[in-house]
Image (tube, grey):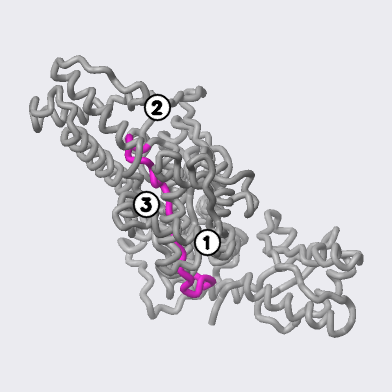
Amino acid sequence: MKLDLTNQIKKLLKSSIKKSIAQEQISVTEVPELILLATKNKTHGDIATNIALQLSRKLKINPMIIAQYIVDNIDKDNLVIEKIEIAKPGFINFWFKNDWLYQIINEIRTKGNDYGKVDIGKGKRIQIEFVSVNPTGPLHVGHGKCAAVGDALSRILKAAGFYVEKEYYINDQGKQIDILGKSVQARYNDLLGEEVEFPSDGYKGSYIIDIAQEIVDLHGNRFMGSNCAEAQEFFKDFTLKKISNEIKKDLERFGVSFDVWFSEKSLYEKGRLQEILKILEQKDMVYKEKGAVWLKTSKFDDEKDRVVIRENGIPTYFASDIAYHQDKHQRGFDKVIDVWGADHHGYIDRMKAAMRALGYPPEFFDVLIVQFVTLIKEGKEVGMSTREGEFVTLRDLINEVGKDVARYFFLMRSYDSHTEFDLDIAKSESMENPVYYIQYAYARICSILRKAEEAGIKINENDQVDLNLLNADEELALIKKLSVLKDVLKRSAVSWKPHLLTTYLYDLASTFHKYYTVHRIIVDDISLSKSRLMLIDSTRIVLNNTLNLLGISSPESM
């Protein structure tokens, strides 16, 4: 039996609306999506819907009248609802039956790590490509936010029943890689006392000097003063591998792994750019002008046509991206989601136009734009400049605040809003730090369970625990909060908003802390102790499952 409370309420509402239509109380061919909202004030019930207000806009009827029709037609013999009230201007408020709530605890303990999972995806194949930083330097904090968002979204969609593949696109081809190799080569010669001109557009970070020093340590003066093709290729390949490996290490420390690392260079080696150009020519989607080849992106709502092959015959990055996304389509994904930084916003229309030029359905390709990160320390902004090498790396951030805190802070607000990352709060081990606050709730529960076991009070699988003893307001509030995880996960998966889970997680921890301050868990009454232990153990499971969805650990002691 599925114990999804919100789903049960929605079924009752749908049945009621059908009755209202059959009785000609309302006349509507399409019912808006049913939205259920957890109430903040318990005098407004446990959950509420605005469906009467939505229908009112369609029908031009007073929403209070529509709400009354719906309430009158709800099956009064249902197992879920204790009480229903209508509130102005047309909200319908519901109170759950306690007996139904108690079943939630049994479901949580039965399903364990699987509690909260849903199957709205039905195995649909989704590929999420994220981070995909040019391997020209270390990951900075902005890349960390993209990593956290992409990884959390992947976890959420998997838990929602989708088949998900995570991919990193390695930009290992083109001018920026040539400049990278030349930058290291120049520093290498400097270290050996050979004065050479540093590239005007070269990479100036201290990491470039570190890589050059490593080459000196390994190869001495073997390449000193040499500018032949072999030397240039060596510096380029060595630096590319070095930085790529460091990026992988940093991502692994951040709890992010990828199913596929896709090389841009492989597109050239397999002749995929020539292949995509022929396809676009056959579809009459390209033309030549002033020696360059242009794609007719303006035909598909882009502001102008775009160059795919330059006058010198060298493909643009846009051409590589088109070939890359064709490869994604050929791998059989139903949908691909690219997670990009805010500086790529202007690139969306041309990529969507390219997908339409290839004949792919509009829903095949989507982009999430992740907004910028500002670091705050002692109330002041920490300045960053990537080209000059003056930036805070993701590695530095992890060293300073830890993986869990960094991930939570990046996910704390919607990805499309600017993040102000307060380092002072992030480093504090106090209830002001939301991660400490949440993890402390988990650790506190683990500590109570250990103490109970030491006192000889342990809940075995076959124990009959009287959950009716859980009748205090704080206990019922905690069970209700546990019951909505599935609904939050669904909304997060459908909207692609991981921050809905960080908000839920904080609220759940807060509900537990409030409960703990009012009620002792281990009391003289063994039956009451066992029922409360079962409640907090269910809370432990849900905290753990939600933290896992966000890629954050669940420490058993702090």
Q: Residue at x 64, y 76 (%)?
A: 8
Q: Is residue 87 left or right of residue 552?
A: right
* Residue 374 visible somewhere in the drawing: yes
* Residue 531 visible somewhere in the drawing: no
Q: Position of residue 254 (x, y in %)?
A: 34, 46
The secondary structure type at the circle numbered 2 is loop
The secondary structure type at the circle numbered 3 is strand
The secondary structure type at the circle numbered 1 is loop
The verdict on residue 55 being magenta is no
Confirm or deny contact between disc 3 and disc 2 (CB under 8 A): no
Relative to 309, say whether 491 is above or below: below
Q: Position of residue 105 (x, y in %)?
A: 50, 71
Q: CA distance from mark 3 to mark 2?
A: 22 Å
State the residue position of label 3. 168
Q: Residue type at mark 3: give it.
A: Tyr
Q: Is residue 231 left or right of residue 462?
A: left
State the residue position of label 1. 358
State the residue position of label 2. 387
Q: CA distance from mark 3 to mark 1?
A: 23 Å
Can you tell which of label 3 and label 1 is closer to the viewer?
1
Q: Which sits earlier in the primary sequence, circle 3 or circle 1?
A: 3
Q: Position of residue 338 (x, y in %)?
A: 48, 53
Q: Residue at x 45, y 56 (%)?
A: 277
Task: Judge the density around disc 3: few (<14), some (14-19), many (≥20) Cα neighbours within 10 Å.
Answer: some
Q: Which mark is residue 414?
A: none
Q: Residue at x 30, y 32 (%)?
A: 180
| Residue interval drawn in magenta | 116-139
Q: Residue type at mark 2: give it.
A: Arg
